[in-house]
Amino acid sequence: MVTSIATRQVYGETLVQLGKENNSIVVLGGDLNQSTGIAGFAKEFPERFYDFGAAEQNMMSVAAGLASTGKTVFASTFAVFGTSRPFDQIRVGIAQPKLNVKIVVTHSGLLTAEDGASAQSIEDLSLMCALPTFTVIVPADGPETAQAVRLAAQTPGPFYIRLSRPATPIIHADTYSFVLGQPEQLREGADVTIIASGPMVHYALVAAETLSSEGIKAGVINVATFKPIEPSVITSAAQNTNALVTVEEHYIHGGLNSIISQITAKHCPVPIEAIAVNQYAESGKADALFEKYGLSSSKIVAAAKKAIQRKTEAK
Amino acid sequence: MNPSNNQSVSLEDLVILAKNLRKTILHTIHRAQSGHPGGSFSELEILLTLYHRIMRHKPTDPSWRERDRFILSKGHASPGLYAVLAEQGYFEEKELLYFRQINSLLQGHTSTITPGVEMSAGSLGQGLSFSVGVAIAGKIDKAGYRVYVLLGDGECDEGQIWEAAMSASHYHLDNLTAIVDRNRIQNDRFTDQVMTLEPLQDKWEAFGWHVIQVDGHSIEELTTVFEEAKTIKGKPTVLIANTVKGKGVSFMENNPAFHGKAPNDEQLAQALDELST
């Protein structure tokens, strides 16, 4: 049984299936097509695949033009080249007229590792969540990626889906059913709830297991849809455990911690600890970067204990 | 009535119409006390030629699938396009009264909320890329429509124009015609002072385009070269339309001050007077 798979690989395979089912799908790439996983689609459907080279601004505006004619457009590159570089083209050209463009990026966050700070997108979710018409999804694993990509293809409007480079652990069974906008309670807790996104969900589950061995009951929630988000699962967890930890592979401002803090501040303020990136990082192995920049499971365990301590002190 | 690429309006009447639309544009911008008269005047004959002589389109059905597409990349020159769209019947002329006002159909920079507007613009440099997307869709669907995109000359400062130019010839988009409104003035000053564009024809040719120079205020000449562009196979065509910014009003012509400034009451009166003779 496969225990881990790269979400970009799943994306590429899903696109080929979708291409067979829906001939309005057109895929655009920018000279990174093996890496992003869309080369399979290019091979299978050459008449519906266009490469724009290292020119992402052009690629995004072309995507808008294609979508204006009724095409369902997927545009893929690395996270940094698919967000911050062509942001104005996305904002004016895709977001404002609400065009049917799916920006699916790979190589996001610190997991991009050895390529260093320029390649490690830690701002992309802040940027994309700042666009009012965009749906923003960070799948936790392969099965969730397949369903999110399929759902994006079937749902009109702009989508941003954030994927990773390395193979990451599979969390969901094949029977899993992704519901857009709905946070997923993966593990029930009583003392604290760890709310995580993307590949960090795995680290949250590992941390919860460690906490359990120490007698602390930690719940785990997977937030795959950043926007729009249905708050009830989050508010219930806040009310039931009165202590939260957010865990994301992204800069602390404008990502998961910001979203969860907005929800709880409005509905049920409780102590929240954040595991997130706080500065630009550097080249290195992913494990070493996670350790140095505070994203490891042991850091999550410590943050959970701190959140519990804060709620105890507040009583 | 339409698809309206017939020649029902005579050349003489189109020349009179151009004068009247310049008055409409002046009133529109004067009422809003903001907007861009200079580029709206320089582009006007190009728009009239396309909508009256060249394009197949249906004002009563703006999303008709087989329509030829016109994309205004220099979205600030919206009053010129709005005047033509209203004249064509895409929306009622009274909408012009509310240009740039709250709850209006007519935004300061073109937006797809307006019937007949294909692309939301306002950030320069994006329209050629958008048009490449529309042209590629036409190729995929084996549709017969043609794509026309109007660029400002100052807009050609944007690097994205040249990314798009490269990709249009790479994909042999002979269903695409770009027009550069070469009025030689951009926001602050003359284009030569801000950023050298020449040799502009050589640049487009080097990027793989068929290039035609044309008097951008001659409907007759424009009609001829738009027809020529339809016959060019295997590559896109660009018209370098030599125009006069502020064309038709003496104190606006070749005057950078009227790139993005509304006339005051006195200037309006004088301009209307000139356009009535």
Image (cartoon, coloured by chain):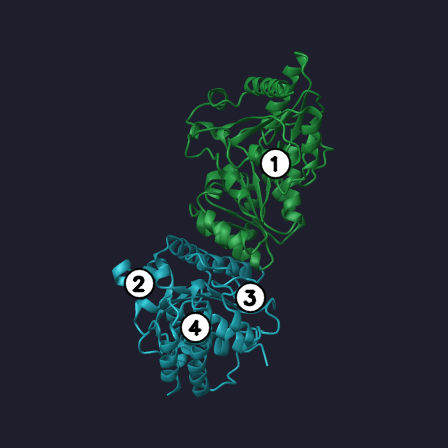
Chain colours: A green, B cyan
Task: From the viewer's side, name the closer residue of A234 and A96.
Answer: A234
Sequence-wise, the earlier of marks 4 and 3 is 4
| Numbered badge on residue A10 | 1
Residue B201 location (% of width, % of height): 31, 64
Residue at image location 48% in from the left, 34% down from the top: A122
Closer to the camera in the image, B206 or B38: B38
Q: Chain of mark 1?
A: A
Residue A256 percent location from the top left of the image: 57, 34
Mark 4 to mark 1: distance in Å?
57 Å
Q: Which mark is residue B30?
A: 4
Q: CA distance from mark 4 to mark 3?
A: 16 Å
Please state the chain letter of the residue tagged with numbered disc 2 in the rendered image. B
Instruction: Give the residue at mark 2.
Output: B200
Asked if residue B183 shows in the view, the reply is: no
Q: How many residues crowd mark 2 within 10 Å: few (<14), some (14–19), many (20+)?
A: some
Which chain letter goes with mark 4?
Answer: B
Disc 4 to disc 2, C-alpha distance = 34 Å
Q: Amino acid at mark 4?
A: His
